Image: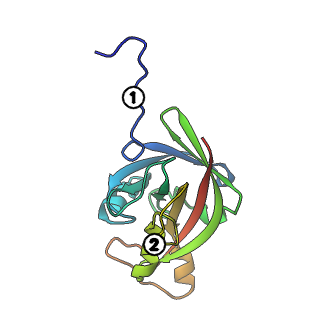
Amino acid sequence: MPAPDAKPAAPDPKTATALLSMPTIGVKDLKVVPYEGTTDDRAGTVIQDRGVAASPYGKRGGVGPGEVGNYLVTAHRLSAGGPMRDLPALKKGDSVFVQLGGTVYEYRITDTRKTSFRSERSLAEQRAAVPGKPGERPTRAMITLSTCATPEDHAAGNFWSDAQGNPEHRIDKIGVLVSR
């Protein structure tokens, strides 16, 4: 039994559910459910179908909030309540907040990327420990927020989708940790 004055153990950032807020686009306390896997695989899509965000970790996934590397967060834009409906409106310099236990991590958006599900290279860049740079060793905590580009793909006449119904392209917003 722990001592009465002992602090409770901090949650494991990789496996604990976090809350995501993006004030600029009106997202507040979106649940981010971690799972062992990779972005937008079947397990991640099942989580997103519940109207929450999914965060892969492990050999082919990312890290937890605040950890050095790429914290990957994916959610639906058009279905399951569309929690990331307005993600494309996030701009360079906007703040994104992730709460885990009693800690709030602030990330600042630095870049926008487009990922193609039909390109292994593009997927590797999205999932890299340093977004956009497969094989580069990370030195800081980063975040990749990702959602579908269905409206943009369809407007361009591209109706391709994978087995999970994902369109060819994803919109990724990249950020760096600026405070905790």
Quickly name the residue at label 1: 9
Q: Which residue lies furthest to the right in this view?
A: 93
Q: Nearer the viewer, residue 96 or 148?
A: 96
Q: Residue at x 34, y 70 (%)?
A: 164
Above-or-below relation of 163 to 22: below
Q: What residue type is labelled 1?
A: Ala
Judge left or right: residue 176 versus residue 66: right
- Nearer-N-terminus badge (1/2): 1
Q: How far apart are marks 1 and 2 (CA)?
A: 33 Å
* Residue 113, image x, y percentages: 57, 72
Quarter of the image where the C terminus is located: top right
Instruction: Bin the neighbour count of mark 1 within 10 Å (Cα to Cα): few under 14, some 14-19, many 20 and up.
Output: few
| Residue 40 in the image, given as x and y percentages of width and height | 38, 66
Residue in front for this viewpoint, 166 or 140:
140
Residue 112, x across and y down, in percent:
61, 69
Specify the quadrant that holds the N terminus.
top left
Q: What SS does tag 2 mark? A: loop
The 10 Å Cα crowd at callout 2, few under 14, some 14 to 19, many 20 or more, is some
Numbered label tally: 2
- Residue at 48%, 34% in the rendered image: 101
Q: Which amino acid does label 2 sit on?
A: Pro
Residue occupying the far bottom of the picture: 157
In the picture shown, does residue 154 fall above or below 166?
below
Question: Residue 108, position in %: x, y?
Answer: 65, 54
Residue that label 2 marks: 134
Q: Of 116 and 124, which appears nearest the observer? A: 124
Q: Which residue is drawn at 53% across and 57% down?
A: 139
Q: Residue at x 57, y 78 (%)?
A: 152
- Dividing the picture into quarters, in which one does residue 124 lie? bottom left
* Disc on res. 106: none
SS state under label 1: loop
